[in-house]
Every structure is written in structure tokens, then in C-alpha cells.
Image: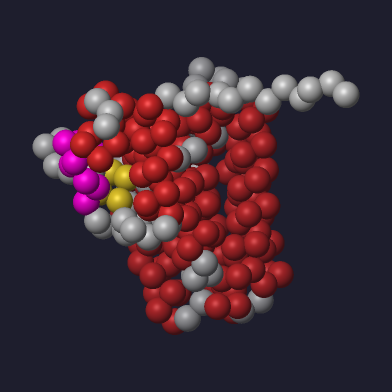
Amino acid sequence: MNAISEPIVRKKLSDEVFSRLKQMIETGELKAGDEMPSERELMERYGVGRPAIREAMQSLAGKGLVEISQGERAKVLRITAESIIRQVDLPAKLMLSGSSDSLEHLKNARIFFERGMIREASGKATAEHIAQLRALLEKQRASLGDADAFIDADMEFHHCIARISGNPIFVAVSGAMLGWLKSYHTEMLIWTGRENFTLSEHEEIIRAIESGDADLAEQAMVKHLERSRALYALKGQS
């Protein structure tokens, strides 16, 4: 019978420190908002040098578990859907910047997602929600001539529809996708005078949500997004 090889992999000191600190967070020994022990305390507790502690802390920060501020102790972060999705923000933008196919996939994913969101909204929207959407539409109308402000108001409008769902995961996904798309928004919206199309389509969307007719609301959203999808392109290809 041949012996099975099971070599023991020696961990870096910083990896071991990371594992122990992560366990303290996972078990609740350290809770959201708590300050992490000082570097000196951790050095004495684990018998390691400052570089290992700092590297472990950076790894925790990179995982979205702690926040490191200059001159202050690191603090344990409250884990939310938004904070989790934010961790993939930079990789997502790098992926999109390298491939027109990836950007097209994101546009398709956004349409798929927003079709569901507006159906949710049409069944849950209150008079207050409708008022919020109308206020955002007026904010967008007042931003005519200011490209950045107009686009920001546009994003707020769609994000508000996601918030009507009451599901924080939907809200986080909406915010992430809108943020990624904003990086690839061309000036076509402004210099072709399509702002008025957007405003009238948003008005139509509000009326459809207010009617409570999910099919009508979905149709209005799909028409709007299919018309506007050409406004997003890789830089240099618009």
C-alpha cells in the first residue's frame, strides 16, 4: 500500500494573524463598530512583529471586514449587501473596460434586472413613492443643459425604483450596475438632444407604476432601456 502524501503547508505569520482576527469577528467577540485591538496589543498577544499585524489588517480591510483610518484604530465594519458588492467594484470596472462583449452583457443584465424591479414597484409603490419619483423627474428636468447632473438624476430615478422593493440586496445590485454603467456613459445623451425622450419615458414609467399594472410598467421600462442602451459604449468607441 502506497503512503499518501499530505504535506503540511506552513502559513505566513500574517495569514495566521488574519485567520485569528477573522474568527474573532465571525464569533461576535468583535462586533460591528468595535475598535480592533491596537497593534501593540496584537503583537504581544500573538508574539509576532508589526509587519505581520499590518499585513493582516490590510487583508481584513480588503475583504471589507474592517475600516482603517489614518491615526485611528481600525474598526469592524457592519456587513451589508452594499458593502459586499462594493468589494467587486474595481474588478468589475476592469472587466468591462477590456471588452465590449462584457459591456453588452451588463446592458442585457440591467434590462433583465430592471424588468423585475419595475414589476415589484408596480405592486408595492405607495403615494409617497410616487411623489419621490416625481420629485426626481423634476430634478432631472431642472438639470437640462448640465450633463453630469442630468445623468446623476437619471441614475437616482432608477435606483429609487429598486428601493421601492424594500429588498436591500436589490438596492445594492441596482446601485452597483448603475455605477458601472456610468463609467461608460457617452455624451450622446446631451449632444443629440435625447434628454426630452428620457424625461417623457420617465413620466410614462411613473404613470405605469402608479396604475399598478405590472405588464404595462414592464413594457414602459423595456422601451426606455432598449432606446437608451446605445448611450453606453467603451471610451473611444462612441
Q: At x 49% / y 38%, what residue is drawn?
A: 88
Q: At x 24% / y 47%, what residue is drawn?
A: 36
Residue 213 visible to an observer of this rendering: yes
- For the N terminus, which image quadrant? top right
28 and 195: which is toward the camera: 28
In the orientation shown, which residue stands out farthest toward the left? Answer: 71
Q: At x 79% / y 22%, what residue is drawn?
A: 3
Q: Is residue 42 left or right of residue 210?
A: left
Q: Is residue 38 inside the magenta stretch?
A: yes
In the orientation shown, which residue stands out farthest toward the front? Answer: 1
Question: In the image, residue 64 lies at what x, y percent?
Answer: 39, 43
Question: In the image, residue 178 lies at what x, y percent?
Answer: 48, 46
Residue 223 visible to an observer of this rendering: no
Q: Is residue 14 inside the magenta stretch?
A: no
From this view, report whether residue 191 is shown above or below residue 99: below
From this view, report whether residue 58 is shown above or below residue 99: below
* Count of numbered circles in the view: 0
- Image quadrant where residue 208 sits: bottom right
105 and 132: which is toward the camera: 105
In the orientation shown, which residue stands out farthest toward the right? Answer: 1
Question: In the image, residue 51 lies at what x, y percent?
Answer: 26, 23
Q: Is residue 189 left or right of residue 51?
A: right
- Image quadrant where residue 221 sits: bottom right
Q: At x 60% / y 65%, what residue is drawn?
A: 118
Magenta part of the chain: 35-42
- For the C terminus, which image quadrant? top right
From this view, report whether residue 148 is shown above or below residue 143: above
Question: In the image, residue 168 lies at what x, y percent?
Answer: 48, 63
Q: How is the image coloured?
A: secondary structure
19 and 118: which is toward the camera: 19
Q: Is residue 139 left or right of residue 111?
A: left
